[in-house]
Amino acid sequence: IYEVKAGNVEKGKAMMLPIFKDMLTQGAEAVIFGCTEIPVALAEQNMTSPKQCLDSLEILAKYCVEWSYEAEHTALAS
């Protein structure tokens, strides 16, 4: 993570990728990318295997938007 923050994305990827692959090899169905730097370093894996890469920020943003639309729709219906 510190390497990505420092602008060394390739070095960060080289450090994170083996861990990502090892988690899947050990039986994980998916890996939670719980830090904003992880999707940056593992962008290729996110593109090629999106069901195995759970970007927590992307998931949070999606559900916030859905909640906002539902709240707006509920307010308009009242």
Image (cartoon, helix red, strand yellow):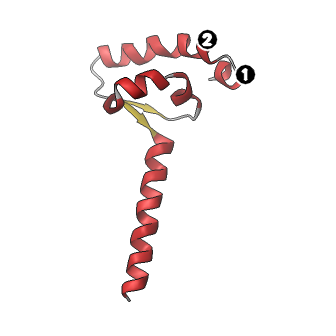
Q: Amino acid at mark 1?
A: Ala
Q: Depth check: give the residue in front, 32 or 51.
A: 51
Image quarter in which the N terminus is found: top right
Q: Residue furthest bottom?
A: 78
* Label 1 with label 2: CB-CB less than 8 Å: no
Position of 55 relative to 47 (above/below): below
Q: Amino acid at mark 2?
A: Lys
Position of 72 relative to 39 (above/below): below
Left-right relation of 40 to 45: right
Question: Real-space Cα distance between discs 1 and 2?
Answer: 10 Å
Q: Which mark is residue 11?
A: 2
Q: Residue at x 45, y 15 (%)?
A: 19
Q: Residue at x 49, y 51 (%)?
A: 61
Q: Residue at x 43, y 83 (%)?
A: 75
Q: Which mark is residue 74?
A: none
Residue 6 at x, y = what percent? 72, 21
Image quarter in which the C terminus is found: bottom left
Left-right relation of 30 to 33: left
> Which quadrant of the figure has residue 74?
bottom left
Q: Residue furthest right?
A: 6
Closer to the chain start, of discs 1 and 2, is 1
Residue 15 at x, y = what percent? 55, 12
Q: Depth check: give the residue in front, 15 or 7.
A: 7
Q: Residue at x 51, y 43 (%)?
A: 57
Position of 77 relative to 29 (above/below): below
Q: Depth check: give the residue in front, 21 or 40.
A: 40
> Which quadrant of the figure has residue 70?
bottom left
Q: Which residue is mark 1?
A: 6
Element marked by disc 2: helix
Residue 65 at x, y = what percent? 46, 60
Element marked by disc 1: loop
Task: Please tell me how crowded label 1 is: few (under 14), some (14-19), or many (20+) other residues with Cα within 10 Å.
Answer: few
